[in-house]
Amino acid sequence: MTTANKITILRILLIPFFIVQTLYYFRSGDELHRFLGVVSFAVASILDGVDGYIARRYNQKSELGAILDPLADKLLLVSGIVLLSFRNQTYLKVIPLWLTATIISRDVLLLIGLGVIHMVCGKVTVRPRIIGKVATVLQMVTVIWILLKWSPGWLPYWTVGAAVCTGVSGLLYIWDGMRQLSASPRSSATPGQ
């Protein structure tokens, strides 16, 4: 259990706290709950960079970290995006459903694709791209922007940017997956007997 993995586990443990505080804020409007929700989301987001830095700097990359790190990212972002998509809360701006659908659809397609590639090829090679990292940052900015109640005039730019980068990164991952499947001998047609 490396230090980077321990930080990632801490990030995962912050997610339920963030969800509960945000839901309490929706119900009561008590600013303390919003503050605690913002702090937990921000700390989990910052720790994403910290655990990655530690893993690279101190050579603590591990198979467990390769699974936990993206899982922590997805759980945090999807929980924030879904929570802020609720129309029944009156204290914060709402994330448009088309952004929520774009993010969740991409993640579901990627999970299905990873499963198919693993079953056919036996090994999945994921090549991170800068556009995927930009999408993640824009999603985090969108959630934090809303939680901090900053100027709503900028919100459309963050949401459209997040949607475009999320969609493009999803298409690139699908392209990479298709290439992996095409290169696998198991995906070729077997000659008739």
Image (cartoon, helix red, strand yellow):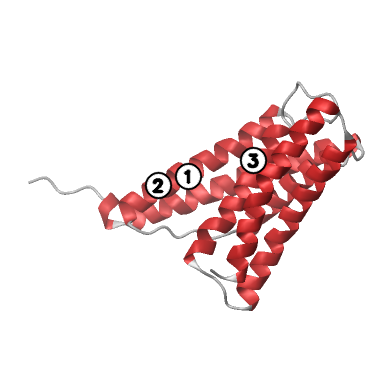
Label 1 is placed on what type of residue?
Leu
Q: Residue at x 64, y 51 (%)?
A: 13
Q: Name the residue beneath numbered marker 2.
A: 115
Nearer the observer, 188 or 11: 11
Q: Earlier in the sequence, mark 3 or mark 2?
A: 3
Label 2 is placed on what type of residue?
Gly
Nearer the observer, 174 or 111: 111
Q: Name the residue beneath numbered marker 1.
A: 111
Q: Residue at x 85, y 43 (%)?
A: 35
Residue 183 falls in which quadrant of the image?
A: bottom left
List the single residue furthest toward the top.
88
Task: Please identify, in this view, whether the residue under mark 3 or under mark 2 is nearer the observer.
Answer: 3
CB-based contact (under 8 Å), mark 3 and mark 1? no
The picture places residue 74, in percent across and down from the top left corner, at 61, 47
Label 3 is placed on what type of residue?
Val
The picture places residue 52, in percent across and down from the top left corner, at 64, 66
Q: Name the residue beneath numbered marker 3.
A: 78
